[in-house]
Image (tube, coloured by chain):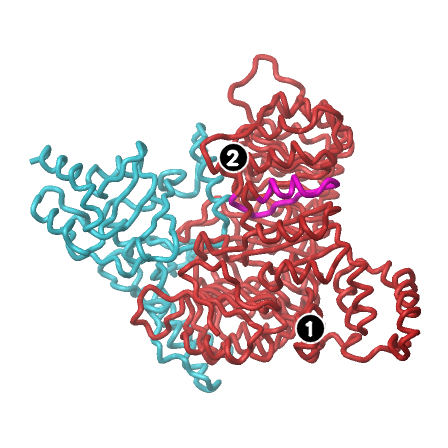
């Protein structure tokens, strides 16, 4: 058994060094070793995406093979050419929201520049995300993303029916194109909307990213046809720009 | 009952809770399933002279028998496990036990209806009700799932006008419910709400204003939100006279309280021993309160900071020195580290210290912990690092419970604690009974070491934040580490696993984890075998919570023999089909099988969430639309 696991280990190592692009690893490497932790294919269905369904074998003899196969598959990145989006997994790690929010608040309150082990902006901007028709609310930390594209990738992972059909290169609604916008809003495609600090509901993507992170309180993914009421504001902005 | 500092660090869950056969004493379920490992009174018939042997005897003897039994035996039984066993002896004992049970524990609010519970136990003074399963804390359940306290409030109000204590955990409680409590029980003394939501300051005010004999009011890790816009100054609602308050806990309330009212309250509560303030109470305010209550034994220090540095700062250390009975400290919600030395005078006597909201580093921790020789419970953030853990290991040889929470809970982080600090703890704190440890890296060797150094472990919860992460040094799965834990810690009752685990880890758990009652599994295992090992091997399994594991229908079916013995089974985002869940529901009619479908209707394994539990009263009628109850 140890030998088998040893073999598995080698396989893992090879795969890891081969495919390791993008984010530097978490604590997995440590101690100056070459092995960098591969960012896992994360997101709500990360596991089922990577593991072949055929692995529902019952016999113990096949178990050994399964271990090898499964471990190999777990290390595969979705697509090595694209750095994986930092999608969040719901409820992981198992830290209660109450505690998470406390930590966020604390970091926001601190004036002194104590060295943090994490590099990105301290604290976070948690926003609840709901999608019409989906059973749960999710929460996202907007400071985890650097652009609308990253956010929509993450949302697409969380809500599988949220497809990216009509979005342009930016990954979000193209406000420059009036007719495209109207098409979208007349369709049954889902569009992301958000509630800003003033309590107004807006279409996501109408302001620069940083401004969005600062003002977004809540996200709601609704059908384009429902979002039509928000169109006037969006259209106004469109007109202001062109 | 979860508290910031549970008294003895035992496993949070109950002993064999009111088992199904127990409450169903009408003979609906066979006893065999419950007495699997507890050869107790079982189902033997009574050995006492049975009333009913003659019609005259029926009139005289029952009362005598009952009285004898009551006085001589049942009076001494306090543990509900013992009481459950006693109630199985015969009908007389069952009735006598029901009449003498004063503490009612309902582990799952849907396992029994309020009506049935109050009908059986007529002289109850204290009620505990638990609602949602733990994974609901992590946004894995719809917000409106249920666990409403309202029907219980109504039933209790009717059945027990003399009720003194109510403890609720993960229940949905409204202001109206609290008003019912305040209005219905003239002798009400104790209200404890843990991880509850749905109520606001208005509900609290109802309790504080009407329950004149109130001794304990504890709101713990609960969401207190005003339903309407107005906040109510609930602290001012306490009676103006001297109060009976012994414990006031409101550290989770996210609204400022009226400090003057609070100070006056503390001044006129001579019996106050436990006071946990929220973060809106500043350091200078804390000082004033401490001067008024030097008799405190448990103190939650509020923010432990100040909005502005005062010209002349009070002598905080002297306030602590005056509290000679302090044994438990918590709070430190927005700590200014330079205030930390103020607690030094009490360190020598501290048995419990909760710094889990305080971002302190190793040096800062060391400066206080080196004096805490009697410490038994420590909660901290991983900001203390491996060095901080080493400092704990050096001094706190009496430590029973350790919890280390992450400052940064993201998966890509580098963490400040690792197998190094973990192993140091195991070497220094040999009496450890309970550990919850979040980290970014771990090794089998360190876990094996802890299994050997700390054989008294009852609760082992290791959370390697990166999912599927193997041993940081060998890159092997973490099977051997967890295997060693179940093998060497013979008393283990609660286990949470993490990291890269194959079916082998679960084979170990099934083989050695004979006393395990609660098991948490997330992103682990390879095949159905893993779950089968556990369901077939762990006869004491009560609460099994599984998420994102490749366990499917065959595994689910392998537990049919055991599900009536369990409080619940939770499986979310696994590989279950509706058909299999349906089959279980049909095979076990007293099981309530709740499912939520996956959004992707085309998926073969179409169950997003399975939550099933035994119940005497069938499916509930308050489930939200998204939940389907199969039968």
- Residue in the foreground of this view, choosing between B500 and B600: B600
* Numbered mark located on residue B373 in the image: none
Q: Is residue B255 left or right of residue B94?
A: left
Residue displayed at 55% across by 34% down = B201
Q: Is residue B219 left or right of residue A14?
A: right
Residue B145 magenta-highlighted:
no
Q: Are marks 2 and 1 in contact (CB under 8 Å)?
A: no
Q: Is residue B604 left or right of residue B319?
A: left
- Residue in the foreground of this view, choosing between B600 and B377: B600
Task: Check disc 1 and report the residue beneath it.
Answer: B21
Q: Chain of mark 2?
A: B
Foreground mark, 2 or 1, reads 1
Chain rendered cyan: A
Question: From mark 2 to mark 1, how far is it between C-alphas?
Answer: 43 Å
Q: Which residues are magenta?
A: B177-198
- Residue in the foreground of this view, choosing between A175 and B78: B78
Q: Is residue B263 above or below residue B296?
A: above
Residue B589, image x and y in percent? Answer: 55, 76
Residue B597, image x and y in percent? Answer: 38, 66
Chain B: drawing colour: red
Residue B481 appears anywhere in the view: no
Q: Is residue A139 left or right of residue A59?
A: left
Labels 2, 1: one chain: yes
Residue displayed at 37% across by 77% down = A69
Task: Check disc 2 and report the residue beneath it.
Answer: B254
Q: Dot 1 surroundings within 10 Å: few (below 14), some, or many (20 or more)? A: many
Residue B31 appears anywhere in the view: yes
Q: Chain of mark 1?
A: B
């Amino acid at each position: 058994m140890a030998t088998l696991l040893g073999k598995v280990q080698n396989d893992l190592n090879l795969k890891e060094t081969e495919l390791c692009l993008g984010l530097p690893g978490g604590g997995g490497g440590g101690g100056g070793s070459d092995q960098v932790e591969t960012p896992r294919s994360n997101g709500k269905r990360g596991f089922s995406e990577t593991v072949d369904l055929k692995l529902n074998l019952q016999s113990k003899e096949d178990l050994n093979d399964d271990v090898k196969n499964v471990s190999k598959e777990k290390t595969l990145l979705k697509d090595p050419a694209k750095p994986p989006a930092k999608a969040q997994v719901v409820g992981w790690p198992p830290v209660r929201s109450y505690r998470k929010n406390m930590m966020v608040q604390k970091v926001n309150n601190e004036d002194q520049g104590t060295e943090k082990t994490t590099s990105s902006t301290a604290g976070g901007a948690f926003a609840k995300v709901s999608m019409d028709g989906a059973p749960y609310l999710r929460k996202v930390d907007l400071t985890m993303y650097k652009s609308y594209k990253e956010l929509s990738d993450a949302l697409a992972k969380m809500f599988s029916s949220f497809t990216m059909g009509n979005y342009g290169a930016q990954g979000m609604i193209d406000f420059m194109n009036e007719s495209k916008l109207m098409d979208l809003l007349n369709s049954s495609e889902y569009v992301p909307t958000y509630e800003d600090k003033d309590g107004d509901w807006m279409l996501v993507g109408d302001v620069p990213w940083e401004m969005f992170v600062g003002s977004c309180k809540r996200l709601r993914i609704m059908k384009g046809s429902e979002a039509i009421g928000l169109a006037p504001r969006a259209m106004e902005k469109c007109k202001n720009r062109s | 009952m979860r508290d910031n500092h549970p008294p003895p660090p035992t496993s949070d869950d109950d002993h064999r809770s009111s088992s199904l056969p127990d409450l169903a004493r009408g003979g609906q379920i066979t006893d065999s399933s419950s007495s699997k490992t507890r050869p107790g009174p079982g189902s033997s018939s009574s050995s006492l002279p049975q009333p009913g042997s003659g019609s005259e005897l029926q009139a005289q003897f029952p009362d005598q028998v009952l009285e004898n039994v009551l006085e001589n035996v049942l009076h001494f039984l306090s543990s509900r496990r013992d009481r459950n066993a006693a109630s199985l002896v015969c009908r007389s004992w069952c009735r006598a036990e029901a009449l003498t049970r004063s503490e009612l524990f309902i582990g799952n609010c849907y396992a029994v209806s309020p009506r049935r519970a109050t009908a059986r136990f007529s002289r109850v003074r204290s009620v505990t009700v638990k609602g949602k399963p733990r994974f609901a804390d992590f946004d894995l359940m719809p917000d409106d799932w249920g666990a409403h306290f309202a029907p219980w409030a109504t039933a209790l109000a009717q059945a027990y006008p003399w009720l003194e204590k109510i403890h609720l955990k993960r229940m949905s409680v409204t202001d109206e419910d609290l008003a019912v409590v305040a209005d219905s029980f003239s002798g009400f003394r104790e209200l404890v709400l843990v991880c509850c939501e749905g109520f606001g300051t208005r509900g609290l005010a109802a309790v504080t204003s009407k329950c004149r004999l109130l001794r304990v009011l504890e709101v713990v890790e609960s969401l207190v939100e005003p339903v309407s816009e107005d906040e109510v100054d609930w602290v001012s609602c306490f009676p103006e006279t001297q109060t009976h308050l012994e414990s006031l806990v409101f550290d989770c309330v996210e609204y400022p309280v009226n400090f003057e009212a609070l100070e006056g309250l503390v001044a006129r509560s001579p019996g106050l021993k436990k006071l946990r303030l929220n973060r809106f109470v500043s350091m200078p305010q804390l000082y004033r309160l401490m001067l008024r209550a030097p008799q405190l034994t448990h103190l939650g220090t509020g923010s432990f900071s100040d909005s502005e540095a005062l010209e002349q700062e009070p002598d905080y250390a002297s306030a602590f020195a005056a509290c000679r009975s302090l044994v438990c400290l918590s709070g430190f919600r927005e700590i200014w580290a330079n205030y930390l030395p103020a607690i030094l005078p009490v360190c020598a006597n501290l048995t419990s210290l909760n710094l889990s909201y305080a971002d302190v580093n190793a040096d800062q921790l060391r400066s206080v912990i080196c004096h805490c020789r009697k410490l038994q419970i420590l909660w901290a953030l991983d900001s203390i690092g491996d060095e901080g853990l080493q400092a704990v290991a050096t001094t706190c040889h009496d430590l029973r419970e350790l919890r280390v929470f992450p400052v940064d809970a993201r998966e890509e982080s580098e963490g400040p604690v690792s197998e190094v600090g973990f192993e140091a703890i195991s070497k220094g704190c040999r009496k450890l009974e309970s550990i919850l440890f979040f980290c970014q890296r771990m090794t089998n060797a360190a876990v094996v070491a802890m299994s050997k150094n700390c054989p008294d472990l009852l609760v082992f919860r290791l959370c390697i934040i990166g999912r599927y992460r193997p041993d940081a040094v060998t890159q092997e799965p973490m099977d051997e580490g967890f295997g060693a834990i179940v093998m060497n810690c013979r008393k283990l009752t609660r286990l949470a696993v993490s990291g890269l685990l194959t079916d082998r880890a679960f084979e170990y758990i099934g083989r050695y984890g004979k006393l395990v009652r609660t098991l948490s599994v997330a992103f682990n295992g390879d095949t159905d075998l893993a779950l089968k090992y556990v369901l077939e091997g762990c006869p004491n399994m009560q609460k099994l919570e599984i998420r994102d594991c490749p366990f499917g229908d065959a595994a689910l079916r392998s537990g049919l023999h055991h599900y009536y013995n369990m409080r619940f089974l939770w499986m979310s985002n696994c590989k279950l089909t509706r058909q299999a869940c349906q089959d279980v529901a049909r095979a076990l009619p007293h099981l309530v099988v709740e499912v939520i479908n996956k959004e992707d209707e085309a998926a073969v394994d179409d169950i997003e969430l399975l939550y099933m539990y035994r119940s005497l009263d069938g499916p509930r009628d308050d489930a939200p639309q998204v939940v389907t109850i199969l039968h």
